[in-house]
């Protein structure tokens, strides 16, 4: 295997292999600026590869390697073993954690499925090859009603400037305070906006000139993946997030994106809102670990602090 050092070569490979946007160069660059190291490996026949994130762990361990929504391409047991061996040799990692963008995954001997997940495997993925009428018909009745109702009260546009993103961050902080979840510093979000360039899609819902809701995705031609979203109290009154999400879905569909992933379903109000957009759920394969050192049991069973550190990749 060879390491890829240029963004154009790597992103061309990811797109050609219908890879996930978390495997794009920009995601690795963002993580490299915020506590991780990133390496990109491509097979000699250029048919498969992986963007690998490395995080140092407390001693006596060395590091954990993590592949979000990858590897990319045609993967089998032999290829995974080749990648694991190279990572262990070069970086002395204690374990390799993989969360593939597939509903089934058979990594072979030496791997174990784990509940130590970073990305939530249960999600909702819309097939954008369906017509708008078909997508609408699969929604809950109340969701359709709220889309129609809110669409008459708001206007939605795609946002392109850092000033517009700053307005989103104000809404996001308000949302985080209300829902009681933690955020990164502003620089993290601005780095994503900057480093993903044309692959970032931020849509804002406005009442007049006031931003009242936003949804933020990154996308390849294969899949659009929701990262963040927020809504003000006024936005909640107008059900603005319904018309906003429908606008994002239809706009990405018009650009030829094939799937729309809502990024995780939990037992919370946000997930109840997401579930209204379809009559199904998707269950991805989940998380698989490959032990690569004698310290692996310490990672797997004894260090909740280390696991919390790694889970910061989620937001």
Image: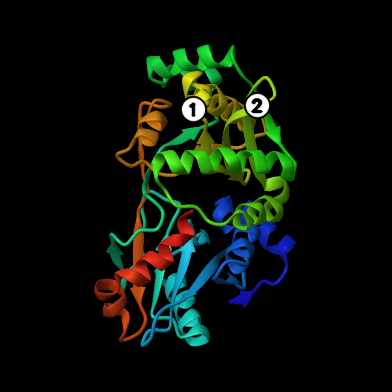
Residue assigned mark 1: 233
Question: How far is the residue under mark 1 from the one under mark 2?
Answer: 12 Å
Residue assigned mark 2: 210
Graded by Cα atoms within 10 Å as few (under 14), some (14 to 19) or many (20 or more), the crowding at tag 1 reads: some
Residue at horizontal 39%, vertical 14%? Answer: 141
Residue 258 falls left or right of residue 121: right
Residue 155 image offset from top left, x and y in percent: 65, 20
Where does the N terminus fall, quadrant-wise? bottom right
Residue 8 falls left or right of residue 102: right
* Label ID, residue 34: none
Which color scheme does this rendered protein use?
A: rainbow
Classify mark 2: helix, strand or loop: strand
Against 27, is 162 above or below?
above
Residue at horizontal 31%, vertical 84%? Answer: 295
Task: Between residue 235 and residue 84, name the one nearer to us.
Answer: 235
Residue 87 image offset from top left, x and y in percent: 49, 79
């Amino acid at each position: 295997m060879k390491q890829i050092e240029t963004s154009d070569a790597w992103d061309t490979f990811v797109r050609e292999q219908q890879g996930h946007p978390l495997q794009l160069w920009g995601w690795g660059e963002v993580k490299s600026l915020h506590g991780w190291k990133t390496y990109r490996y491509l097979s000699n026949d250029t048919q498969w590869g992986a963007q690998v994130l490395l995080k140092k762990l407390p001693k006596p361990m060395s590091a954990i390697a993590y592949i979000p929504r990858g590897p990319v391409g045609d993967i089998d047991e032999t290829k995974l073993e080749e990648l694991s061996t190279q990572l262990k040799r070069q970086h002395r990692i204690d374990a390799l954690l993989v969360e593939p963008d597939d509903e089934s995954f058979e990594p072979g001997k030496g791997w174990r499925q784990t509940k130590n997940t970073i990305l939530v495997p249960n999600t909702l993925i819309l097939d954008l090859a369906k017509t708008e009428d078909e997508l609408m018909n699969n929604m809950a009745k109340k969701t359709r009603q709220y889309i129609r109702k809110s669409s008459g009260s708001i206007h939605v546009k795609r946002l392109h400037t850092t000033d517009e993103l700053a307005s989103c961050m104000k809404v996001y902080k308000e949302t985080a305070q209300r829902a009681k979840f933690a955020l990164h510093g502003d620089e993290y979000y601005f780095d994503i906006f900057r480093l993903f360039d044309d692959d970032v899609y931020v849509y804002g819902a406005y009442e007049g000139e006031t931003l009242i809701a936003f949804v933020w995705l990154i996308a390849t031609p294969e899949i659009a993946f929701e990262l963040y979203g927020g809504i003000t109290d006024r936005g909640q009154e107008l059900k603005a997030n319904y018309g906003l999400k429908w606008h994002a879905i239809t706009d990405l569909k018009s650009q030829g994106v094939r799937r729309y992933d809502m990024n995780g379903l939990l037992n919370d109000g946000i997930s109840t809102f997401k579930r209204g957009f379809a009559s199904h759920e998707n269950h991805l394969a989940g998380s698989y670990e490959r032990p690569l050192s004698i310290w692996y049991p310490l990672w797997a069973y004894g260090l909740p602090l280390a696991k919390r550190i790694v889970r910061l990749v989620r937001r």
